[in-house]
Amino acid sequence: MATESPAEARSTVNPDDPYENWNRSVFVFNDTVDSWVLRPVAQAYRTVTPDIVDRGVTNFFNNLTEIRNFTNSLLQLKGESAVVAFGRFTFNTVFGLAGIFDVATGFDLPERPEDFGQTLGYWGAGSGPYLMLPFLGPSSPRHFAGLATDGFVMPSAWDSVDSPESYYARGLQIVDKRADFIPAEGLISGDRYTFVRNAFLQRREFLINDGKITVDPFASEDEEDLMLEDF
């Protein structure tokens, strides 16, 4: 029996990705920018930054996201998650030196990520089609609306636009986040665009359904693990 070529397979519209041709073009653009700019900087950052410092930077920015987690937990009527987010922020800020050390996890308060995209899903808003956005990467209308809304909740949004420190901090956060993805790159197999898309969609489903997800039975064990990471 004849098999479809990749081009023929893409000619059939995927209901989850109706703009695949456009998305693939943006994916190539993002990948080029990443290969020539962001990844080399992130690799250099990993090379010169001691592990304990790298972990501290990641913890610091993760601690700030607890404000987002707390706010969206309240909006989703998740009282327990709101208490956990408040407790994590308090413990890590006071006892973890402004969040550099994640002491809250040691107190049995693991992070419970909540964002406004999840809040929209909780209240019944559909995800919409898959989108690959320039510079921002995988998204959807619901996810992008959540990103834009959460941007006004995060403390950095309150900083003066004339303050260069806010830009330095945002740049450090982006580089640190990209550096954290480098070890997982070897798990990506097959068509990279398809892998990234499936990883993103499954991760969002996982978050919106509070961990209840039907994993693709044809995905390898390593692929499933990567898909459930914070892609």
Image: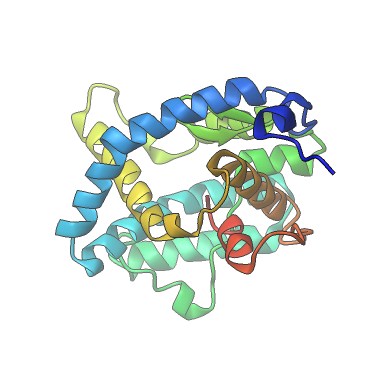
- Residue 193's x, y, as percent? 56, 38
Vertical order, 82 against 12 (above or below): below
In this view, the residue in front, 188 or 39, is 188
Left or right of residue 11, residue 59 in this image: left
Q: Residue at x 43, y 54 (%)?
A: 185
Left or right of residue 124, residue 108 in this image: left
In this view, the residue in front, 9 or 15, is 9
In this view, the residue in front, 202 or 149, is 202
- Residue 138's x, y, as percent? 56, 36
Q: Residue at x 18, y 58 (%)?
A: 47
- Residue 46's x, y, as percent? 23, 57
Instruction: Name the outermost residue toward the front.
Output: 1
* Residue 98 lies in quadrant: bottom left
Q: How many numbered marks, from 0 up?
A: 0
Instruction: Check the picture and name the quadrant holding the N terminus.
Output: top right
- Residue 79's x, y, as percent? 70, 59
* Residue 146 lies in quadrant: top right
Vertical order, 110 against 219 (above or below): below
Tell me, yes or no, if residue 19 can be seen here.
yes
Tell me, yes or no, if residue 17 can be seen here.
no
The colour scheme is rainbow
Q: Residue at x 32, y 52 (%)?
A: 179
Left or right of residue 73, residue 188 in this image: left
